[in-house]
Image: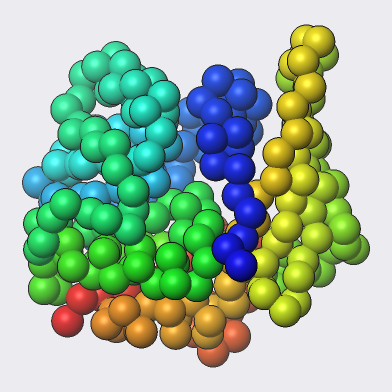
Amino acid sequence: MSPRFDLDAVFAPDDYIYFFETLLTDEVSDEEAALAAVLLGVDRGTEVLDLGCGYGRIAIRLARLGAAVTGLDRSRGFLERAARDAVAAGVDVEWVESDMRMLPWAEEFDRVLMWGSTFGIGDDAGNAAVLDAAFRVLRPGGRILVDVVNRDRALRRPLPATVNIERDTDWLSDRWDFDPETGRSETDRTIVRGTATRTMHFSMRLFTPPDLGRHLEAAGFEVLGVYDEQGTPGSLEAGSSDAHRLLMVAAKP
């Protein structure tokens, strides 16, 4: 049975941006984009595909560095916001509305970026299809950077766990648990804005470094390195149990 993920509700642009921009500030986004550029080796003119680009906060910043960026997302609302922000930033980014599993290119890009846990939404077959598509659109020698939650660190907290985000009198609450049989987190989200209350559910595959490495290698990639959210190198065999994020760079031979 496919994992339940209420995509349209979880990624409703108005609610998502309203709450998460309190955490994903300009300073945070600047730091994340700079790290992604360093780990991927993005230079002026590098052709980058940002998969699951959301409202473009990383894609726009990579374009500011001189990269030729294409941002892809399934949400038209996110892409409309991204297009407005790109104009305001004075950069040119190509925005594409599409499913990550069905990319309309072959050997078109030097780099592929999957930032902010955009990988792991699907079931195992769907996740494999995303990496197969990413492999196909990269030129030989191209690189991919995948950023996901570090499973071992996430599971160190008592479960089920609750995470809250408050903005003025509104709030978002995530209550999540882990299913060891599927390797997935299962989250119930409640959003209260004004007098309206919305509930939704989403499921994410959580990865250890060896597990993520196996997925990349199964798609044909060669793993080059594993890092934490600060860009500190770790071990493919173990990684860092203290890291909140797991960042892995791999290359297409």
Identify the residue at image location x=44%, y=85%.
214
Is residue 226 in sight in this rendering? no
For the view shown, which residue lies furthest in the top direction? 194
**Location of residue 212 with respect to 101 vertically, above or below:** below
The quarter of the picture where residue 21 lies is top right
Relative to the observer, which residue lies in front, 45 or 168?
168
Identify the residue at image location x=29%, y=22%.
83
Identify the residue at image location x=80%, y=60%.
177
Relative to the observer, which residue lies in front, 42 or 131?
131
Q: Pick the quarter of the image with the C terminus.
A: bottom left
Q: Pick the quarter of the image with the N terminus.
A: bottom right
Count of residue discs: 0
For the view shown, which residue lies furthest in the bottom direction? 237
| 210 horizontally vs 140: left or right | right
| 90 horizontally vs 199: left or right | left
Q: Residue 146: where, in percent of width, then height?
A: 41, 63
Identify the residue at image location x=63%, y=54%.
4
**Location of residue 167 with respect to 59 vertically, above or below:** above
Looking at the picture, the colour scheme in use is rainbow
Is residue 95 in sight in this rendering? yes
Q: Residue 158: where, in percent of width, then height?
A: 90, 63
**Location of residue 152 with respect to 40 vertically, above or below:** below
**Location of residue 240 with respect to 170 vertically, above or below:** below
Q: Residue 59: where, in percent of width, then height?
A: 31, 39
Q: Residue 172: where, in percent of width, then height?
A: 76, 31
